[in-house]
Image: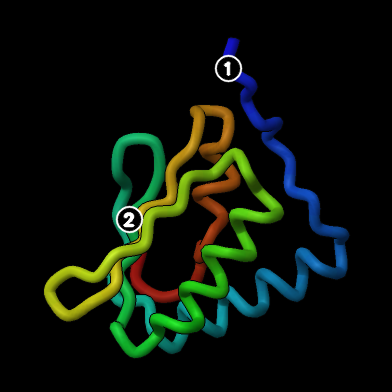
Amino acid sequence: MTSIAPIACTLTAAQYRERTDDIARLAGAALRARRRIDGGVRLTFDAAARERLEAFVAAEAACCPFLTLDLRAAAGRLVLDVTGPAEAGPVIEELFAGSGPG
């Protein structure tokens, strides 16, 4: 039997606010495209944001283990696919919501 991680973030309210502020700054500086994909969202960033994106992916993987975060380079940009189970849809939609291209 496969264990499925619960759809719950492990951050405190203060940590969550700090994380969303960090995400907004990252998106404002480097997010260039956002589109829905099966099971989540594809976010495209400037390649110069690699270090910040890698830190974001590590941090999100630690607090939201129900998400799958796939970061890769493509055509001179960085592409981040964020996917998860259907129940994670609202969490995925909230990532980078209101920041950068929609």
Q: Is residue 46 above or below residue 44?
A: below
Q: Is residue 66 above or below residue 77?
A: above
Q: Are marks 2 and 1 in contact (CB under 8 Å)?
A: no
* Res. 50 image quadrant: bottom left
Q: Residue furthest front?
A: 1
What residue sits 43% from the left and 88% below the top? 29
What residue sits 48% from the left and 73% below the top? 54
Query: Tag 1: residue type?
Result: Thr
What residue sits 68% from the left and 35% below the top? 7
Q: Position of residue 98 (x, y in %)?
A: 51, 68
User: Which quarter of the image is occupied by the C terminus?
Assistant: bottom left
Mark closest to the chain's N terminus, 2 or 1: 1
Neighbour tally class for label 2: few under 14, some 14-19, many 20 plus, Cα within 10 Å: some
Name the front one of labels 2 and 1: 1
Q: Which mark is residue 79?
A: none
Q: Position of residue 101 (x, y in %)?
A: 34, 71
Between residue 94 and residue 72, name the one nearer to us: 72
For label 2, the SS is strand
Q: Is residue 2 above or below residue 25?
A: above
Q: Residue furthest top?
A: 1
Q: Residue furthest left?
A: 75
Q: Position of residue 17 (x, y in %)?
A: 77, 70
Query: Tag 2: residue type?
Result: Arg
What residue sits 62% from the left and 25% below the top? 4
Q: Which mark is residue 2?
A: 1
Neighbour tally class for label 1: few under 14, some 14-19, many 20 plus, Cα within 10 Å: few
Residue at the disc numbered 2: 42
Q: From the viewer's perspective, is 94 left or right of 40?
A: right
Q: CA distance from mark 2 to mark 1?
A: 26 Å
How many dots with numbers? Answer: 2
Q: Position of residue 56 (x, y in %)?
A: 56, 70
For label 1, the SS is loop
